[in-house]
Image (tube, helix red, strand yellow):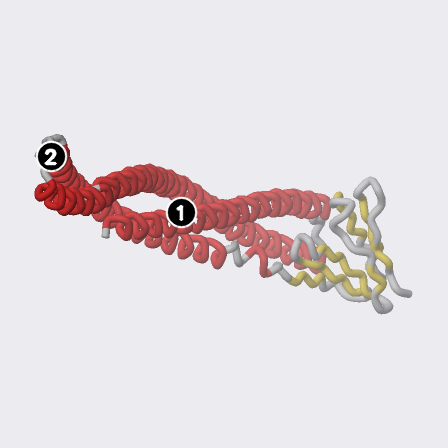
Amino acid sequence: MAETLGCGSGGTSEGVAGTNGVKMEGVVSSNSFQRQKLPEGILRYTNWNFGYYIGYKQGSSKCEIQEAVSPEFHEVEELDVAKLEEQASHLEKDLIVKERETLDVLKELEKTKLIMDELKQKLQKEASEVNSVQQANAGETNVTPVLKEEEKENNVIEGGNLNSVEGVCPYPSAAPGLILMELKQAKLNLSRTTTDLADIRSSVDSFNKKLEKERFALDKTRERLTQNSSKISSLEEELNQTKLKLQLAKDAESKGGSENPLDISKELHRLNSEVEQFKKVGEDARSEVLRATQEIEHTRTRIRTAEVRLVAARKMKEAARAAYV
């Protein structure tokens, strides 16, 4: 008849072998064993979460153990760590380029300020010259003309000339005022642009600090993954030793020895609990890797925002330059 292996709520499973009357029992996890119905005369202990199964055939003294370690214990998120390091290096290069561009913009702003100061000085000189011309014209208009008929025509002609001069003068007097207003507005725009660039530079510095923190966290995660790999290798060695013990137990049974199967089942239970602990550690490391990835994406979004602000600052600088021309 086919033998059925099950596990109750208490975590104890029993299986009766064939004709030799050997009884194997062990304390195992209630969720680790799977219920299987096998062909007649075969009893199999299966634990895929643990990574091995034991088959026992009726009518013979051979106890087969096979290892089916899951590939997830051998591959410990090495690709994710490599991708994160590559992303961090790309972000660092992008930040260096942005810092250089910001420095170039600041240099150009300083040059623009010097040009603005020179234009202010020229406009002040022109305004003083225009004021002196207006004062001279006003002095000429205050002279009382001689009341003669011959001189009236000359006065009319001179008055026309003065009116023509006075009609030209208001335009230069108004133009420097408009230019000064435009220059003040351009200076205000430049000050705002300088403030924005300072904010961008401070944000770039904060991004650099965050990248350093993320790099430190990645180094810690890599160390933990390395430790988990070493623990998994040691666990595999213990599994091999357990396999040897089972082989010795099989040989002792064939020779009529009295090896206690309870010790073997206890050893298997201990190894099973260690495997569960290592799985939890692996899940924690995976969650840390995901958290680091999310932080890098958030940093990338902030860098894009800084790029947009840098483009806006450049446009304001071009507008200020156009106002100077």
Residue occupying the point 10% across, 31% down: 143
Q: Secondary structure at mark 2?
A: loop
In front of the other: 266 or 259? 266
Decide if residue 180 is on the left or right side of residue 17: left
Question: 323 or 154, which is in the foreground?
Answer: 154
For the residue pair 60 and 204, the one nearer the viewer reads as: 204
Crowdedness of circle 2 by 10 Å Cα count: few (<14), some, many (20+)? few
Looking at the image, residue 176 lies above or below residue 72: above
Instruction: Looking at the picture, tell me which residue is in the foreground, 169 or 251.
Output: 169
Q: Residue furthest bottom?
A: 39
The mark that comes first in sequence, 1 or 2, is 2
Q: Amino acid at mark 1?
A: Arg
What residue is disc 2 on?
147
Residue 227 in view, yes or no: no
- How many dots with numbers? 2
Query: In the picture, residue 139 is in which quadrant?
Result: top left
Label 1 to label 2: alpha-carbon separation: 72 Å
Q: Is residue 54 left or right of residue 303?
A: right
Mark 1 or mark 2, whichever is nearer to me: 2
Q: Residue drawn 78% across and 51% down?
A: 24
Q: Position of residue 185 (x, y in %)?
A: 32, 40
Question: For mark 1, what is the residue?
Answer: 309
In the rendered image, residue 263, in percent from the top left (x then y), is placed at 68, 44
Residue 251 location, quadrant = bottom right
- Mark 2: amino acid: Leu
Q: Residue at x 66, y 53 (%)?
A: 50
Residue 18 seen in the current view: yes
User: Of helix, strand and loop, which one carries label 1?
Assistant: helix
Residue 229 drawn above or below residue 169? below
Residue 69 drawn above or below residue 158: below
Q: Are marks 1 and 2 in contact (CB under 8 Å)?
A: no
